[in-house]
Image (spheres, rainbow, N blue to C red):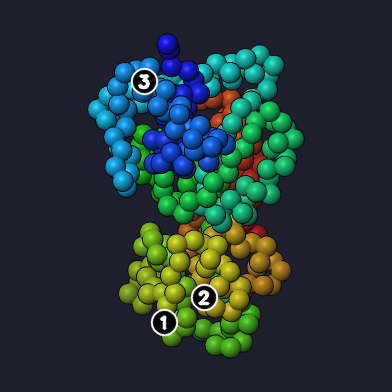
Amino acid sequence: MKATLDEMQAFQAVVDCGSISAAAEQLGQTVSATSRSLARLEEKLNTSLLSRTTRRLKLTEEGQLYLERVRDILTSVEESEELLALRRDQPAGLLRVDAASPFMLHVIAPRVADYQQQYPEVQLELNSNEGIIDLLERRTDIAIRIGRLKDSTLRAMPIASSQMRVVASPGYLAQRGMPVSVAELASHRLLGFTQPESLNEWPLLAEDGQLLHIHPQVKASSGETLRQMALNDGGIACLSDFMTRADRQSGRLVQLFPELTLVSRQSINAVYYRNTTVSARIKSFVDFLASTIGPQSFDD
């Protein structure tokens, strides 16, 4: 008996998710159904693909070799389905997109309805991770990355850039006073990032002529967390325009030292991994973002 696509998908999902229960949830199956699919596959192949301990599942050597082929097979099936959809001039199928929560909330989510109106046969799966993920392990088609790119194995398309500004709420400034010099920021409650440390360098010059490196009183992994703290009079933060533009226009946040702020634009790229040509789904989404955001979309 030959392995079925469903059994291959179950195997790949178990590996990617790290457990049978998590794979079952992703596949929309019961745990027992996913476990049976994996058992049938191993029986047909007459080999163990995964070694099971009380704490984790681990690929056997045969499992690692088979996984590489399974990924190729399932990718080929997806691409074949796309080719049929392209005959109707319409991208189709599941598209998994990952972005940090601020970009997902402020940029992608408001545009989803317009994208689906143009491409109704594409099913979107939107995930948020604050750190850099492995696209293959997370079965992700596109990741939106903000700032300098490091992974040269990924293809990247620039879709926008966004200025960084130092901001605080009128309520906080009423309580603590408006700082009149960059040096005075040291006596204020500063909000910063846990990582990368480069985000704690603000686009202001310190007394030594270098970029101001802050030592935050409160740190967070997400810019959206810092934004919410700033909005609630929690301190001073340095955030990207794409998440604060509406707040500054409404007066909920105020920019500090506008005349001293250096031009410090974060590049925003869509990155994706494909050994073959870019899929129609990926191209449709990346082109849509680039066209609807525009190079100066976040500027005042």
As drawn, 69 above or below 31: above
Which of 87 and 125 lies nearest the eye of the viewer? 125
As shown in the figure, which amino acid type bears the numbered disc 3? Answer: Glu
Q: Quadrant of the C terminus?
A: bottom right
Q: Is residue 52 left or right of residue 170?
A: left
For disc 2, the neighbor class at 10 Å (few under 14, some 14 to 19, many from 20) is many
- Residue 170 shows in this picture: yes
Residue 66, given in percent of the width and then of the height, sits at 33, 22
Q: Which residue is mark 1?
A: 186
Query: CA–CA distance between discs 1 and 3?
Result: 65 Å
Q: Which residue is mark 3?
A: 43
Q: Are marks 1 and 2 in contact (CB under 8 Å)?
A: no
For disc 1, the neighbor class at 10 Å (few under 14, some 14 to 19, many from 20) is few
Mark toward the start of the polypeptide (1 vs 3): 3
Query: CA–CA distance between discs 1 and 2?
Result: 11 Å
Q: Is residue 38 left or right of residue 157?
A: left
Mark toward the start of the polypeptide (1 vs 2): 1
Mark toward the start of the polypeptide (2 vs 3): 3
Which of 13 and 146 lies nearest the eye of the viewer? 13
Q: Are marks 2 and 3 in contact (CB under 8 Å)?
A: no
Label 1 sits on a secondary structure element that is helix
Q: Look at 36% across and 34% down and name the residue there.
A: 153
Residue 71, given in percent of the width and then of the height, sits at 41, 25
As shown in the figure, which amino acid type bears the numbered disc 2? Answer: Ile
Query: CA–CA distance between discs 2 and 3?
Result: 60 Å
Label 2 sits on a secondary structure element that is loop
Which of 213 and 181 lies nearest the eye of the viewer? 213
For disc 3, the neighbor class at 10 Å (few under 14, some 14 to 19, many from 20) is few
Q: Which residue is mark 2?
A: 236
